[in-house]
Image (spheres, rainbow, N blue to C red):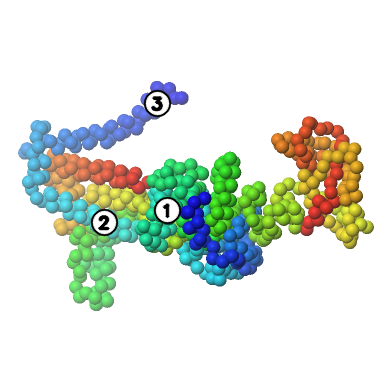
């Protein structure tokens, strides 16, 4: 981008490798276990997302790293230093808050300069670093404005500049885009991603929006009721969800419950050969893994079924069908957009796409 | 939309109220301040004698200055008590917040007079405090300045007006979004820095409102000096009271009242502007 980015980046990353270690962290509020035995390693320069529903503990985990809460058990380490015993103002971690938390009595410039001022940085250095940070988020022309005069997107940029100007080792972002409208949100997503790439600063990002998590992250840590459900790259977590919960939470899926007996998987009307020991089983079959295949020939590694169209939801490039395989078994099928369908049709899916998941 | 007649109808009672009980008395007061008394009768002749008397006789100015000194002391003392109390309740009290808040409010339900007399029994030469000091052999005879002195007036007024200072400050502190405090710590500020750079500036409107309450209410107070002030603790309102009462010089009393009124209105105007400057909604 420009020189400012280079100078920010240079201070950001020590050596490549492990930056943050969360070791068996638990948090209890009264009688409620908000987090249970969380262990998580974050590499330097990584964009990692804590994803989960509200109440899953994702924000609490972020607040533990920031220092606003103390863990009930476990430790947090950063760069070889115990982090969880330090007060927030001694951590080389900065936060972008959900509603930005800009200081209403200070101008944009003074907001951004705040962190440097309280750390008694030399005045000349404050001036140049604040300028750099404002340029980086394209907010130079609003330097003298009060936060209340800015739009949500602009406040978002200021919040980002205010955090990044301190050259944190780790930037925490608490649902930073949730207050923006859809279009602005998409734009800020791509700017955020570009900024993170260029600065090389490690981002720990919290969101409940799985699409946002997929688009931005190097890795996603999915939290469920205070426990880690799965940590993997977006592609991995989408293609190979470990549990039924993950499969349903990340993208859309068809969960097929049934059993495997004598080398055949039986899930309602659907059945296909599967050479594993007999047991009960759940499979995740993504809607786009199923193809419309009227009159086509089934390959050896494919399973075929007939179903009648219940609903057709047009979505521009693709459309979502809801089909009835008989006996009340409903499946969702994503196909390329085409003319309206009705009646019975034949469908086919590759057996390898039916991913076996845990409960 | 409401009809014209309806609007006129509903605005009549408050207008009448304000007109009859506020504007009319003020007009009468201002009129009196330009009249004089001769042989125990108010003479309705326009002149500036009363204002001239105020400027020429140092006793009035002296009492007014003392009153302002006492009011300023009360303001400072009640801020020193009220602000830390409000801060503690808002930021540190946790689950005890509600209880402590009620404890601050409860004294407001007790009559001013009762509280004034209570101080009399505490501060008097036969009082609780002097008895205690002598019992401990810290003093050997009653300490005189405790009662019937400006000190006693400041003490009583501070006791009475601290809740009035506490309330607006507490409200202002409660309105500070807590993420701002976290953001400050997150950016590397210690608790002291956070207080000075974020909490104090954002609570300024409440602080100003509280200080105004304390100052203005003390400035016009006449009960505390009457009860515990003695001769050295006489305040301007006592002078006005005696002029309207025993001394029977309504015009001079009205002139003093007019001056105080102008002083207070300009003060309110000033603090309101300051409060606006310090609010960032």
Residue of label 3: B7
Residue count near mark 1 (Cα–Cα under 10 Å), binned few <14, some 14–19, many ≥20: many
Residue of label 1: A130
Of marks 1 and 3, the one in the foreground: 1
Q: In this view, does B81 lie above or below B137?
A: above
Q: Is residue A256 above or below residue A93?
A: above
Q: Residue at x 46, y 56 (%)?
A: A165
Question: Sequence order check: which comes first, mark 3 or mark 2?
Answer: 3
Quadrant containing the C terminus of chain A is: bottom right
* Chain under numbered label 3: B
Q: Residue at x 24, y 42 (%)?
A: B266
Q: In this view, does B137 lie to the left or right of A133?
A: left
Expressed as whole percent of the image width and height from the top left, the position of residue A145 reads 40, 44
Which numbered disc covers residue B59? none
- Examine the rendering and report whether any part of residue A27 can be seen: no
Q: Is residue A164 left or right of residue A310?
A: left
Expressed as whole percent of the image width and height from the top left, the position of residue A156 reads 50, 47
| Mark pair 3, 2: CA separation | 44 Å
For the residue labelled by badge 1, is the local secondary structure a helix, a strand or a loop?
Answer: helix
Outermost bottom residue: B137
Residue of label 2: B74
Q: In this view, does A87 lie to the left or right of B210?
A: right
| Mark pair 1, 3: CA separation | 55 Å
Q: Residue at x 53, y 68 (%)?
A: A83
* Chain under numbered label 2: B
Report the front residue among A287 and A18.
Answer: A18
Labels 1 and 3 within one chain = no
Labels 3 and 2 within one chain = yes
Expressed as whole percent of the image width and height from the top left, the position of residue A172 reads 55, 57
């Amino acid at each position: 981008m420009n020189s400012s980015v280079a100078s920010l980046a240079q201070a950001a990353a020590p050596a490549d490798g492990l930056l943050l270690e969360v070791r068996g962290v638990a948090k209890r509020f009264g009688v409620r276990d908000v987090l249970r035995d969380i262990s998580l390693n974050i590499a330097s320069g990584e964009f990692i997302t804590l994803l989960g529903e509200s109440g899953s503990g994702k924000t609490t985990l972020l607040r533990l790293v920031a220092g606003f809460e103390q863990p009930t058990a476990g430790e947090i380490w950063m760069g070889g230093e115990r982090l969880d015993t330090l007060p927030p103002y001694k951590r080389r971690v900065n936060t972008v808050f959900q509603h930005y938390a800009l200081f209403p009595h200070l101008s944009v410039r003074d907001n951004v300069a705040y962190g440097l001022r309280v750390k008694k940085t030399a005045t000349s250095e404050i001036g140049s670093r604040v300028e750099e940070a404002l340029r980086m988020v394209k907010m130079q022309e609003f330097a003298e404005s009060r936060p209340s005069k800015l739009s949500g997107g602009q406040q978002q940029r200021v919040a980002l500049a205010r955090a990044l100007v301190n050259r944190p080792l780790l930037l925490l972002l608490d649902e930073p885009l949730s207050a923006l409208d859809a279009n602005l949100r998409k734009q800020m997503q791509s700017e955020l991603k570009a900024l993170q790439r260029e600065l090389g600063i490690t981002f720990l990002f919290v969101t409940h929006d799985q699409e946002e998590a997929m688009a931005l992250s190097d890795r996603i840590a999915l939290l469920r009721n205070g426990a880690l459900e799965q940590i993997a790259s977006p592609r991995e977590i989408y293609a190979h969800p470990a549990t039924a919960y993950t499969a349903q939470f990340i993208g859309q899926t068809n969960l097929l419950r049934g059993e495997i007996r004598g080398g055949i998987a039986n899930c309602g009307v659907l059945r296909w050969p599967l050479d594993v020991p007999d047991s009960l089983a759940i499979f995740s079959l993504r809607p786009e893994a199923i193809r419309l295949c009227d009159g086509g020939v089934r390959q050896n590694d494919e399973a075929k079924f007939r179903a009648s169209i219940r609903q057709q939801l047009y979505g521009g490039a693709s459309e979502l069908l809801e089909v009835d395989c008989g006996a009340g078994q409903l499946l969702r099928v994503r196909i390329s957009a085409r003319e309206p369908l009705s009646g019975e049709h034949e469908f086919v899916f590759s057996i390898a796409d039916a991913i076996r998941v845990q409960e | 939309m409401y009809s014209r007649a309806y609007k006129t109808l509903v605005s009549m009672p408050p207008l009448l109220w304000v007109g009859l009980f506020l504007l009319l008395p003020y007009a009468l007061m201002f009129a009196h301040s330009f009249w004089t008394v001769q042989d125990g009768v108010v003479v309705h002749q326009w002149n500036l004698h009363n204002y001239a008397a105020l400027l020429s006789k140092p006793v009035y100015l002296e009492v007014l200055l003392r009153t302002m000194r006492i009011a300023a002391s009360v303001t400072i003392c009640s801020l020193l008590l009220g602000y830390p109390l409000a801060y503690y309740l808002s930021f540190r009290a946790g689950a005890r917040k509600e209880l402590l808040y009620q404890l601050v409010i409860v004294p407001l339900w007790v009559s001013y007079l009762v509280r004034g007399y209570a101080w009399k029994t505490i501060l008097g030469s036969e009082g609780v405090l002097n008895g205690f000091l002598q019992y401990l052999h810290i003093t050997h005879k009653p300490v005189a300045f405790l009662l019937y002195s400006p000190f006693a007036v400041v003490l009583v007024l501070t006791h009475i007006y601290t809740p009035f200072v506490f309330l607006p400050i507490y409200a202002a502190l409660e309105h500070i979004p807590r993420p701002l405090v976290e953001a400050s710590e997150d950016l590397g500020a210690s608790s002291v820095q956070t207080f000075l750079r974020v909490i104090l500036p954002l609570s300024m409107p409440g602080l100003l409102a509280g200080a105004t309450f304390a100052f203005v209410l003390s400035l016009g107070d006449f009960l505390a000096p009457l009860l515990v002030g003695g001769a050295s603790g006489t305040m301007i309102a006592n002078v006005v009271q005696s002029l309207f009462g025993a001394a029977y010089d309504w015009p001079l009393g009205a002139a003093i009242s007019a001056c105080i009124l102008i002083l207070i209105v300009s003060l309110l105007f000033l603090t309101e502007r300051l409060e606006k400057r310090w609010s960032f909604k």
